[in-house]
C-alpha cells in the first residue's frame, strides 16, 4: 500500500497559495485592515519621527528622535506614566481581588444567582460617560456621597476632584469600579467551568476550605485568572475614558494632575495640536505595553495550568 | 465494616428516588448496586457517602450511626464516575492529597503513597499528570486516592463506564483483585449486569428506588424473584411466552409439554433463557436468523406466536431457513404472574 503524504488535507479550492481567487476573497478584509489599522500605525510611526509637523497640510520637517526626547522630558508625560502605573499597580490588584471575591460569592449562592449576576453586570452595559457623571456627583466635595459616608468614620471632607493629590485616587477608584463587571463575569465563567466533583472529592477527603481554595479552586482557575490579569493590565494602561468623563475632556483635573498616558496622547493631539509629540508618546506607549505583554507571557508559562 | 440501611428514603421533588427498607451490605465483600439508569442506585451510593442527605431513615457503619455525620467523618473512600483527579497535580500528589489534609507526617505520606501505587500497579506513573494517563490508569489512581486513607468502606460510582470494552474487562478484574487484597467493604454502582455478575460477591438489584432482590450473582441469575430480575440479568435476555397450563403440564406446543406442578389463578408468563435450549428431538423448529457470537451461536425461531432465542454450540453449523430439532432443559424455565410479574414456583419448591 502506498503511503499518503502527511500534511494539509486536500483543499477543494486547489492550491490556494497561488490562487488569485483566494486573494480576491480576502481583499475586503485586507482593505479594512489596511485603512483602519495598518495606515494609522504607519502614519503614527512617520509622524512620531518628525521634529515638527502640521496635521492639516500633512507637512513635516526634520527627521529624528527629537519628539521622543521632548515627550520623555515632559513633566506632564512623566506624571502620566506615574499615574498610569498607580492605576495599574494599585487599581488592578484591587479590582481583581474584588471581582474574584464577588464571583466566588455569586458562585456559592444556590438561590438568587441570576439577580446578583445582573446587578453586577449593569456597569458593563452602562456608558462610561454616564457613569462618569454619576461619579462626579459621588465625589463632589460638598454634596457627594463619598464624603458623606466618610463623615461617619470621622474623616474630614476631601476635595476628591480638585485636590491635585487626590485626583488620581479618584480616577483609580473609578477605574476599579468600572472594570469590575466584566471581570466578575469572566471569573464566574471560569468558576463554573470547574467540575463540581473536584469539590465533592475534596469534601470526602475532609479538605479545609482554605486548602480547597488555594489547592483546587485557584489552580483550576489560573488560566481564567491570568486572562483577567492580562486584560485588566492592558485595560488599565489604556485608561482614558474615566479621566475624560470626570473632567469633561477639557483637562485632566487641576493642573492635569489626573493625566494618564492615553489622555496625554489625546491632549497632545486634540487640545495642543502637537501631533508629532502625540505620535511619539503613542509609540512609547506601544513599546511599554509590548514589553509588558512579553513579560506576562513568560510568567504565564511558568505558573498557569492550562487544563 | 458491615453497612446497614434502615428504611432509608430519599425524595426528590415529587418522586421517591430511593426506598431501601432493611438492607445489609456484607462486611469485607464486594457488593454491586445494579439497576437500569434512573433506578436510584447512584443516589443510594451518594446517601451512603454523605454527599446527599436522606429524607428519612438511618445508616449504620457497623454499630456506628453515621446518618448525621458529614462525609469527611464517615471514613469512606469514593471513586467518582469520571475519577475527579485534580488535573494540576501529579499522580503522587493526587494520591497523597487526603493524607495531607489529615496532617500525616511527610515520611509516612510518602510511604503510604508508594504502597498504594504498588497496590494499583502505577509505581512508574507517580510523576505524571492525569491527562498523561489512559482511562484505566486514571481509574487506578482514583482507587489509590480513595484507599490511601484506609477507609472503612470503598464506594465506586460506575467505575467502568468511561472505559473501552477491553479496558473494562481488565479493570473489573483489577477492582476484584484490589478488593480481595485489601479486604475493604466495597460497594460499586453499575448498570451493566455482566459487570456485576462477574466480580461481585453479592448483587443488590434495584428498580425505581426499590430493592428487587439481594443475593449472590449466580443465585440471582438462576433464581430470580420476579420478571424484572429475570429480564435484567442475562445476555441475550430471557424470552417470554404465553404457554397454556393444562392437567399439570405446560404445553410448549400441541405435541410437546413439560410437567409443571403449579396452582395459579390468572395469566401465566413463561420465561425461557436462551441457554435452556439444546439440540434434541422434542420439537422441530425452523431457524429464522443465525448470529455467530464467537463463543457460541445465537439462533432465533418462531414459537407460540413470538420469537424465541436459543444458544447453540459454536461447532453447530446451521443456516437460516433450516429446520432443526431442539429440546428444553426445564431448570432454565421460569413462570411469572402475567399481571404482577411475581415468580410462580412449583409446588415441591415451596
Image: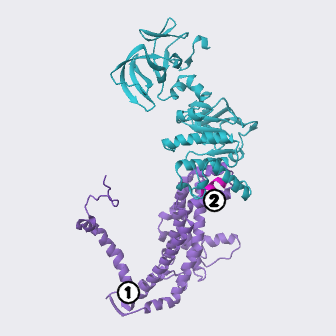
Residue B97's tag is none
- Quarter assignment of residue B77: top right
Could you give the CA–CA distance between mark 1 and mark 2, rounded to whole angstroms? 51 Å
Q: Chain A hue?
A: purple
In-image side of A56 versus B226 (left or right): left
Q: Is residue B44 left or right of residue A283?
A: right
Q: Which residue is mark 2?
A: A215
Q: Which mark is residue A47?
A: 1
Above or below for A114 versus A268: above
Q: On what subunit does the disc labeled 2 rest?
A: A
Nearer the observer: mark 1 or 2; the answer is 2
- B95 drawn magenta: yes
Quadrant, the C terminus of chain B: top right
Query: Circle 1 — which element?
Result: helix
Residue lying farthest left? A20
Residue at 28% x, 59% y is A11
Amino acid at each position: 500500500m502506498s503511503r499518503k503524504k502527511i500534511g494539509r488535507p486536500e483543499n477543494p479550492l486547489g492550491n490556494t497559495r497561488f490562487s488569485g481567487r483566494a486573494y480576491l476573497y480576502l481583499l475586503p478584509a485586507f482593505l479594512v485592515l489596511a485603512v483602519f489599522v495598518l495606515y494609522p500605525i504607519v502614519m503614527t510611526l512617520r509622524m512620531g519621527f518628525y521634529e515638527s509637523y502640521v496635521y492639516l497640510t500633512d507637512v513635516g520637517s526634520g527627521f529624528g528622535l527629537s519628539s521622543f526626547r521632548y515627550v520623555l522630558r515632559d513633566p506632564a508625560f512623566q506624571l502620566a506614566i506615574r499615574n498610569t502605573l498607580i492605576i495599574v499597580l494599585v487599581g488592578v490588584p484591587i479590582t481583581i481581588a474584588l471581582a474574584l471575591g464577588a464571583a466566588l460569592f455569586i458562585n456559592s449562592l444556590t438561590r438568587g444567582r441570576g439577580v446578583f449576576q445582573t446587578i453586577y453586570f449593569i456597569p458593563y452595559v452602562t456608558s462610561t460617560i454616564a457613569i462618569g457623571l454619576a461619579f462626579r456627583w459621588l465625589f463632589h466635595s460638598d454634596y457627594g456621597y463619598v464624603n458623606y459616608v466618610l463623615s461617619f468614620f470621622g474623616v474630614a471632607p476631601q476635595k476628591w476632584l480638585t485636590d491635585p493629590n487626590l485626583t488620581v485616587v479618584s480616577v483609580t477608584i473609578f477605574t476599579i469600579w468600572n472594570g469590575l463587571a466584566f471581570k466578575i463575569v469572566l471569573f464566574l465563567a471560569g468558576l463554573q467551568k470547574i467540575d463540581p466533583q473536584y469539590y465533592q472529592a475534596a469534601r470526602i477527603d475532609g479538605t479545609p476550605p482554605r486548602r480547597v481554595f488555594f489547592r483546587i479552586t485557584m489552580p483550576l482557575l489560573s488560566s481564567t485568572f491570568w486572562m483577567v490579569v492580562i486584560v485588566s493590565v492592558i485595560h488599565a494602561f489604556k485608561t482614558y475614558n474615566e479621566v475624560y468623563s470626570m473632567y469633561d475632556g477639557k483637562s485632566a483635573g487641576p493642573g492635569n494632575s489626573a493625566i494618564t498616558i492615553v489622555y496625554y496622547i489625546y491632549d497632545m493631539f486634540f487640545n495642543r495640536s502637537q501631533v508629532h509629540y502625540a505620535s511619539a508618546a503613542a509609540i512609547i506607549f506601544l513599546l511599554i505595553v509590548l514589553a509588558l505583554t512579553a513579560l506576562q507571557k513568560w510568567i504565564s508559562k511558568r505558573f498557569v495550568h492550562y487544563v | 465494616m458491615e453497612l446497614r440501611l434502615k428504611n432509608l428514603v430519599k425524595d426528590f421533588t415529587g418522586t421517591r428516588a430511593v426506598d431501601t427498607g432493611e438492607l445489609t451490605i456484607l462486611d469485607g465483600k464486594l457488593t454491586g448496586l445494579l439497576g437500569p439508569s434512573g433506578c436510584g442506585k447512584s443516589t443510594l451510593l451518594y446517601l451512603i457517602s454523605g454527599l446527599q442527605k436522606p429524607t428519612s431513615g438511618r445508616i449504620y457503619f457497623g454499630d456506628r450511626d453515621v446518618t448525621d455525620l458529614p462525609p469527611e467523618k464517615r471514613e469512606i473512600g469514593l471513586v467518582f464516575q469520571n475519577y475527579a483527579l485534580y488535573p494540576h497535580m501529579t499522580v503522587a500528589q493526587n494520591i497523597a492529597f487526603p493524607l495531607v489534609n489529615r496532617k500525616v507526617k511527610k515520611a509516612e505520606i510518602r510511604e503510604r503513597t508508594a504502597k498504594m501505587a504498588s497496590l494499583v500497579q502505577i509505581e512508574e506513573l507517580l510523576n505524571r499528570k492525569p491527562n498523561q494517563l489512559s482511562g484505566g490508569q486514571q481509574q487506578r489512581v482514583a482507587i489509590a486516592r480513595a484507599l490511601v486513607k484506609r477507609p472503612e468502606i470503598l464506594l465506586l460510582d460506575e467505575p467502568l463506564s468511561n472505559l473501552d470494552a477491553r479496558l473494562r474487562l481488565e479493570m473489573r478484574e483489577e477492582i476484584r483483585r484490589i478488593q480481595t487484597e485489601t479486604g475493604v467493604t466495597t460497594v460499586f454502582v453499575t448498570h451493566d449486569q455482566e459487570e456485576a455478575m462477574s466480580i461481585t460477591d453479592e448483587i443488590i438489584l434495584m428498580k425505581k428506588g426499590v430493592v428487587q432482590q439481594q443475593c449472590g450473582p449466580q443465585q440471582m441469575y438462576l433464581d430470580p424473584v420476579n420478571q424484572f430480575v429475570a429480564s435484567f440479568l442475562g445476555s441475550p435476555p430471557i424470552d417470554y411466552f404465553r404457554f397454556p397450563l393444562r392437567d399439570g403440564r405446560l404445553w410448549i406446543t400441541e405435541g410437546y409439554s413439560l410437567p409443571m406442578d403449579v396452582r395459579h389463578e390468572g395469566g401465566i408468563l413463561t420465561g425461557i433463557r436462551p441457554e435452556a435450549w439444546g439440540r434434541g428431538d422434542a420439537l422441530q423448529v425452523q431457524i429464522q436468523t443465525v448470529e455467530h457470537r464467537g463463543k457460541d451461536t445465537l439462533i432465533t425461531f418462531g414459537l407460540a406466536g413470538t420469537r424465541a432465542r436459543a444458544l447453540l454450540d459454536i461447532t453447530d453449523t446451521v443456516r437460516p431457513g433450516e429446520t432443526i430439532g431442539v429440546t428444553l432443559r426445564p431448570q432454565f424455565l421460569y413462570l411469572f404472574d402475567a399481571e404482577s410479574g411475581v415468580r410462580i414456583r412449583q409446588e415441591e419448591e415451596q
